[in-house]
Each structure stands twice: as C-alpha cells, then as structure tokens.
Amino acid sequence: MPSYIQSLLLAATTIYHAIACWLEDKNPPPGKLIDVGNYNLHLYTKGERKDKANPTVVLEHSLGGIEGYFLIDELAKLGQVCIYDRAGFGWSDISPYSRTSQNMVMELDLLLNNAGIEPPYIFVGNSFGSYNVRLYAYRFPEKVVGMVLSDALHEVGMLKMPWSLQGLKYFFASGFVMSVFGAILGIIRVFKIIGAFELLKPELRRFPQVVRQSSSALVDNGAGNFAFGHQ
C-alpha cells in the first residue's frame, strides 16, 4: 500500500477518534464527578452498605486498566463497591500534579472523603494499582481493614530484577506505549467497532453489552485525555 494512502487512513482514523471522543464527552458518565480541588475525578459506586461496620470495597485499576467496570456488578452483590478513574483517564480531569503514587493516594483519599464514602475500606489493587493501595494502607492504616492484590508488583523487587527480566519489563512497557499511540490514532476504536477484542478474548462476550460499551468508552476517553488535553 502506498505511503500516502497509509497516511490518509491514519489521518482519517485520528480525526474520527477525536470527533467520537468529543461526542462521548457530551454523554453523562456512569458515576459522579467529584471535586477534589479545581478538578474532578470520576467515582462509580454500586451496592449497599448495610451498616457503618461493613467495609466498602475500593478497586484500584492497573495502569490504564478498566477491569473494575467488569467486576463491579458481581462485587456489588456483596456490599458497597467503588471504582474510580485516576486523573487523566476515563471521565476524570487531568490533574495539575505529577503522577506519583504519593499524589494519587492523596487524591483518592480526598475523593472518598468528598464523596462521603466513609471507612473502613477493603482495597483491591491490580498490577500497578497494588502500589497505590499499599501506600494508602501505609498512610491511612486506621481506614483500611484489608487488601486484595492481583498481579501485584513490589518497587524493590522491580529494581532488583535480573537483566533478563528487566528486558521483559521494557518489552511490556513498549507494548503499552504502542497501545497508547494506537488509541490516539483511532486504531483501538476501529478494533472495537469490528469486534476484534471479542475475537481475541471470547470471554468478553459473557459480559452485558452495556458493560462492554462503558468500558470501551473509558478506554477511548482516556486516550482522548492523553492526546487532546481534555479537562
């Protein structure tokens, strides 16, 4: 295929993605936008808390992850569950502060306080989210009664990995960077439209269409925030 046709196709998918993000931003998010100080974070809560002694489950996504949107319906059968979009992802605004776990934890605590979600909490942290929930429990031990860590990472262990695993880490990091640019260029959205993700992972078909649509919009909006500086 001639290079100019490839350039035209990429331009078309990028423009289409930008327009689609703009249209999706006009739709209300599934949860609420909570003010955490001149910017808002998106908090989605389901289930009921029978009394104040029962803990609320708070899910921390992986890096750019959306797994909480697939889990919340089942977990809500057990009690109150909260998931949120970290600043710059999904329906949340971009934060003026650097993206360190320290700042993310302070934003999360402020979010829960301002939303009226009282402790105690049980945190579920997946992959990158495990850093944040461990740090939250360290900073606010009186608020946390339990943690569930999935594919958890440890900062010291990551630094001391042998070179063979260090190379694997950078390989996965390069894949993440490629996926970000794929989203910016609209390629991920095209894959969603043609059902490529369900083809690669048939288990996704078990989830209701509304859940898949919400999670897809989350990914698309996250890429839109990254690419176009959405606030």
Image: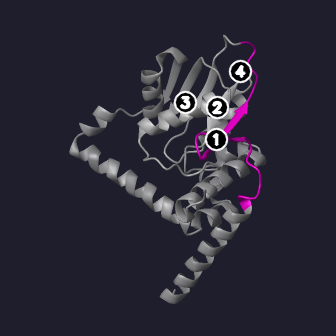
Q: In the image, which is nearer the foreground, mark 2 or mark 4?
A: 2
Q: Is residue 205 visible?
A: yes
Q: How was the colour assigned to the protein in this rendering?
A: one colour
Place of residue 207 in the rendered image (x, y in percent of width and height, measured from the top left)? 72, 42
Name the residue tied to disc 1: 35
Q: What residue type is labelled 3?
A: Asp
Residue 34 position by quadrant: top right
Distance from label 2 to label 4 (Cα)? 24 Å
Q: Nearer the viewer, mark 2 or mark 3?
A: 2
Determine the secondary structure under disc 4. loop
In whole angstroms, how far apart are the C-alphas of marks 2 and 3?
Answer: 9 Å
| Residue 78 position (above or below residue 72) | above
Q: Label 4 belongs to which residue? A: 78
Residue 128 seen in render: no
Nearest to viewer (mark 3 / mark 4): 3
Range covered by the magenta-colored residues: 24-51
Give the residue number, with chain letter if any, for mark 3: 109
Q: Who's the residue at 62% across and 78% down the image?
A: 12
Q: What element carries label 3?
A: helix
User: Can you give x and y, in whole percent of width and height, for residue 130 in the image?
Assistant: 46, 32
Left of 64 or right of it: where is 135? left
3 or 1: mark nearer the eye: 1
Q: Where is residue 69 in the image (x, y as percent from the top left)?
A: 66, 40
The C terminus lies in which quarter of the figure? bottom right
Is 35 magenta? The answer is: yes
Would you say the residues marked 1 and 2 are in contact, meaning their CB atoms lie under 8 Å apart? yes
Disc 2: CA contacts within 10 A as few (<14), some (14-19) or many (>=20): few
Say which residue label 2 marks.
114
